[in-house]
Image (cartoon, coloured by chain):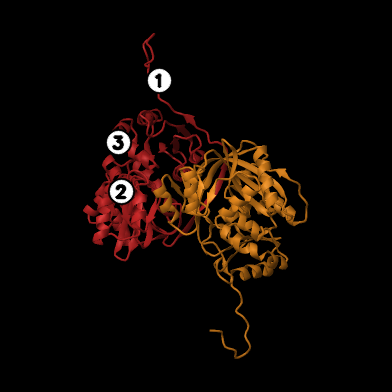
Chain colours: A red, B orange
Amino acid sequence: MNLILSCVGRRGYLAKMFRNVDPSVRIIGTSSLKFTPGFHDCDENYVLPPIISDEYPEAVIQLCREKNATSLLSLYDADIDRLSRFRTEISACGTTPLLVSDPVSDRCFDKIQTAAFLGENGFSTPLTFADLESAEAALLRGSLTFPLMVKPRFGFGSAHLFRAHTLEELRVFFHYRKNMIIQQLIHGQEFGIDLLSDLNGHAISVAVKRKLAMRAGETDQAISVRNEQLESLAVNIVNILGAIGPFDMDVFITEQGPCVLEMNPRFGGGYPFSHLAGADHPGKILRMLRGEALDLEVGVKKDGLIAMKEIDFRVGEPKSKPFSLPSPTHQNGAKEPD
Amino acid sequence: MNLILSCVGRRGYLAKMFRNVDPSVRIIGTSSLKFTPGFHDCDENYVLPPIISDEYPEAVIQLCREKNATSLLSLYDADIDRLSRFRTEISACGTTPLLVSDPVSDRCFDKIQTAAFLGENGFSTPLTFADLESAEAALLRGSLTFPLMVKPRFGFGSAHLFRAHTLEELRVFFHYRKNMIIQQLIHGQEFGIDLLSDLNGHAISVAVKRKLAMRAGETDQAISVRNEQLESLAVNIVNILGAIGPFDMDVFITEQGPCVLEMNPRFGGGYPFSHLAGADHPGKILRMLRGEALDLEVGVKKDGLIAMKEIDFRVGEPKSKPFSLPSPTHQNGAKEPD
């Protein structure tokens, strides 16, 4: 079985997890950069054109075909956003795209759509505005109160995240970049939820962890917990969405109850915490790809398991090959286009 | 030999590096938090009162005494700032403080003092202002130009770092928190320099690396290089400062030449890159502590060595003991003070 980890980045550990389940699985990593730490742990690596380039989707499709890839999953938001629009073409290579459809991708990556989707389906989420005028009106009415978060509409991680305490700050932060949104800051305990859905869009695994320490927008320490309220909330959301493959969700438990902050249709950066607690999503993915039907199961087998991120260092340039489309064949004597 | 790594944080790898040189060295980690990843790699761990508490210095001094610590070094800026004022008391326990003196600490952690020190000694550093009025006047004169960096005077890492493109942004960012400074944004190739000085304040090792990728203010990928200009620049600076122990410096090579951005009197977060290239600072520290006199040496033995940070996960709560001062002895029947 050949598995493509698209935009593998620093997630070499996923390659190891898949191989731990089945040493015969061949992991193919891709990236637009030669210096990709995750390449160290893949069996074969390809440097592809930039995600935003015109030739990128065709390069991915051709890689699927040439490598007889059983499945492809992506670890990077912008990549999922792009490839979710090419599920049919990827499937046509005989490769199962463990990718959400493009409307689901939009509902996850566009924070305005996220808020709308959650609100329409009766899930609590912070009050969110795409324009300054509406936010200022809500402040006047008192339905929105400082402090507010100002962040990129399509961003992720902790880049360009501002906390505004005054109208003056709000205005400057909002205009700092294009496509910023304004969101009510919420308080409470923060949870990360790792899910896995089957190819029909039904959740088959859910694992909840409480975040103990954050660092640069990523979970640094967490404790795996059983929490039926959050488990069923998260399962409901991915089932309504019809997500496919790995999914990651950030939820706060506030004084008013659970409030969903973010959704990502991929392995979250904190998945290893759930993995260590027993959520064997790589194993379940392989079983799924072999045609097995799986029922919903709670991934946390070890309630109360604490884990921490560690830093390690790896020497040397990982091996990779450039992967480019063959140049178009021309008739003899035909000129290259200008 | 007992070595205290004060505020060990996520630097468990330093404990391993010391033990690799000499397996008989006993590493004692401290932190104000029980959940400290670095505790996993120390031989013994103590949870101390918060750094800013009144009882903290006395707790550290007593730990040095009780553990017969040969030496103490700290990995956290705020801790160094505090403990640099207690070098005499630490020495009195028979523990060699691998800590800079408090004036040196001030010159490193107070970015206004950093700029003044570098300027007075003829080293190039970005134009830096502690007040808005002077910065605005410099903008009017044209000696300062947008974009500007606005950051905490005493901060480190990438927290509360703003890039201002307009006067309006500059004003809001400057007033966002207390003690912000305004600095000319500089462009160029970024280098990290790891140094080690002996107990007399003379540099004995220097290792230069070029940063290839950053993430959340930390070096994610780097290539070790030989660069005599940067090596002698960095050695000059620490010798003039009279730094003691590990030291870390950020330098840009701009069109106008090297420009020093930051100095930290501790192991930098990117030290492992230099370690892998041959700079054996833990080994040199142990030799120094055994009384050996060491001459200045270039730490980069493997020019062009590329390394990358990796993420790993560690299960379980590390073992630690609380360490508190014994309650003061009172005469029989004496009342506790209110």
Mark 1 = which residue? Answer: A327
User: Residue A66 lies in what quarter of the image?
Assistant: top left
At label 1, counting other C-alpha atoms closer than 10 Å, the crowd grade (few under 14, some 14-19, many 20 or more) is few
Which secondary structure, mark 1?
A: loop
Q: Is residue A254 left or right of residue B294?
A: left
Q: Nearer the viewer, mark 3 or mark 2?
A: 2
Q: Residue A193: give x, y in percent of width and height.
A: 36, 54
Examine the rendered structure and indicate whether residue B160 appears above or below residue A245.
below
Residue at mark 2: A111
Residue B6 in percent (x, y) is at 61, 61
Same chain letter for marks 1 and 3: yes
Q: Residue at x 61, y 70 (%)?
A: B59
Q: Amino acid at mark 2?
A: Lys
Q: Earlier in the sequence, mark 1 or mark 2?
A: 2
Asked if the residue at tag 2 contacts the one at tag 3, i.e. Cβ–Cβ closer than 8 Å, the answer is: no
Residue under pointer 3: A85
Q: Residues within 10 Å of mark 3 (few under 14, many from 20)?
A: some
Front-most of B195 and B144?
A: B144
The span from disc 1 to disc 2 (Cα, nearest Å) is 39 Å
Q: Secondary structure at mark 3?
A: helix
